[in-house]
Image: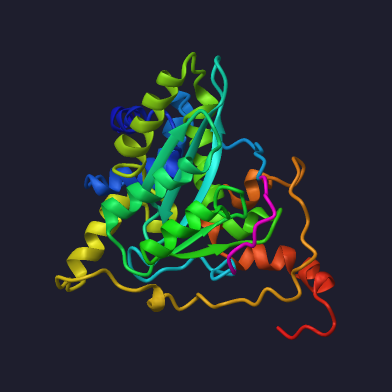
């Protein structure tokens, strides 16, 4: 049993703890208790990776943002209904490498990604174009923060051309894009925090291998019943009658609603202190829902809502 546990731990690049290793053993037909797995791992000196907090900065250019169509309800009933997107930085010995990703909320699969040494709009356009080419959606909601790349004219034009519905959260609140923040917490914990890259080429290769070779295909998510994004989508496809034609419209997303911009004119400028919340808030697969975030922030929202505004 210990040999099987060590093999599963090695296959996960040393990132799995007892819950995911237990799921690995169960998938291979080995019936063993989770506490026994934890006891054997402790005796062998094996442990999973815990997440550390880190921060990035989002810059606004004063452009008018899109409405928030998600309202922290990261729920989708099918693929290509709701996507979330964000940008992070990867430190190397020769300077930062910037990474933009697009995730499908239904399966948490990374459907589009792009890397660049600059924070120009082309970075997020390339990630969006990759997602559109791979998934071919119709009417998908694209949710992001209010960074200047997402509020640019070029990005808005591409969304209109491809029938993508842009959505943006409020300024300075990581919970409004919690699922994208959760992915970056996973990336930092399981890859970036464990390696130092000498060049941009090394960083690109490592990120590509993590996203396409491990995260999408094999990494088990507790929120998906300890299935990988690929396996979760395959099981959904087998249990759903799929007919030829365009993908489902974002109208099937029950949690989506249009939010008026009134009452939100006085927006805070994002600085380094509020760029990204501690990992315990958004750095868990189980914590990407909206209920906990709403409870922690409901009092703040009530104080900021004008008395004449009706919710």
Magenta residue check for 30: no
Q: How is the image coloured?
A: rainbow
Q: In this rendered view, identify the residue nearer to me: 181 or 269.
A: 269
At which x and y percent is residue 59? 67, 45
- Say which of 158 and 114 sits in front: 158
Range covered by the magenta-colored residues = 59-67
Quarter of the rendering containing residue 24: top left
**Residue 277 point in image, percent of width and height:** 68, 47
Above or below, comparing residue 222 to residue 42 in the picture: below
Q: Is 176 rendered above or below residue 219?
A: below
In this view, 299 is above or below 55: below
Q: Residue at 67% across / 41% down in the picture?
A: 57
Residue lying at the far left of the rendered structure: 244
Judge whether 272 appears above or below 261 on screen: above
Residue 48 appears in the figure: no
The residue lying at 41 percent from left, 31 percent from top is: 207
**Quadrant housing the C terminus:** bottom right
Do we see residue 244 in this rendering? Answer: yes
Q: Residue 105, position in %: x, y?
A: 42, 60
Displayed quadrant of residue 127? top left
Identify the residue at image location x=31%, y=38%.
Answer: 212
Occupied quadrant, residue 296: bottom right
On the picture, is 147 further left or further right than 165?
right
Q: Position of residue 80 (x, y in %)?
A: 34, 63
Residue occupying image coordinates x 61% and y 49%: 147
Q: Is residue 247 rendered to the left or right of residue 198?
A: left
Q: Between 259 and 120, which is closer to the camera in this rendering?
A: 120
């Amino acid at each position: 049993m210990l040999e099987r546990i060590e093999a599963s731990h090695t296959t996960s690049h040393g990132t799995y703890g007892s819950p995911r290793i237990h799921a690995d053993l169960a998938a291979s037909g080995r019936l063993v208790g989770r506490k026994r797995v934890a006891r054997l791992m402790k005796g062998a000196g094996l442990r999973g990776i815990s997440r550390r907090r880190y921060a990035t900065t989002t810059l606004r250019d004063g452009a008018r943002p899109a409405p928030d169509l998600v309202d922290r309800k990261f729920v989708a009933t099918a693929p290509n209904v709701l996507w979330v997107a964000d940008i992070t930085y990867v430190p190397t010995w020769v300077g930062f490498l910037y990474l933009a990703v697009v995730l499908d909320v239904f399966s948490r699969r990374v459907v589009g990604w792009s890397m660049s040494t600059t924070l120009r709009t082309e970075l997020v356009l390339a990630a969006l174009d990759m997602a559109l080419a791979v998934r071919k959606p119709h009417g998908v909601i694209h949710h992001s923060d209010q960074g200047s790349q997402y509020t640019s004219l070029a990005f808005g034009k591409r969304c209109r051309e491809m029938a993508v519905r842009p959505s943006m959260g409020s300024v300075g609140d990581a919970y409004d894009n919690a699922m994208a923040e959760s992915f970056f917490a996973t990336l930092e914990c399981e890859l970036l925090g464990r390696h130092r890259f000498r060049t941009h080429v090394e960083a690109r290769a490592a990120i590509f291998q993590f996203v396409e070779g491990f995260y999408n295909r094999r990494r088990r998510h507790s929120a998906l019943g300890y299935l990988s994004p690929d396996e979760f989508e395959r099981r959904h496809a087998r249990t759903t009658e799929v007919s030829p034609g365009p993908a489902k419209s974002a109208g099937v997303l029950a949690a989506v609603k249009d939010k008026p911009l009134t009452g939100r004119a006085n927006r805070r400028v994002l600085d380094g202190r509020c760029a990204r919340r501690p990992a315990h808030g958004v750095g868990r697969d189980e914590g990407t829902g909206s209920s906990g975030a709403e409870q922690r922030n409901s009092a703040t929202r009530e104080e900021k809502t004008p008395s004449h505004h009706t919710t």
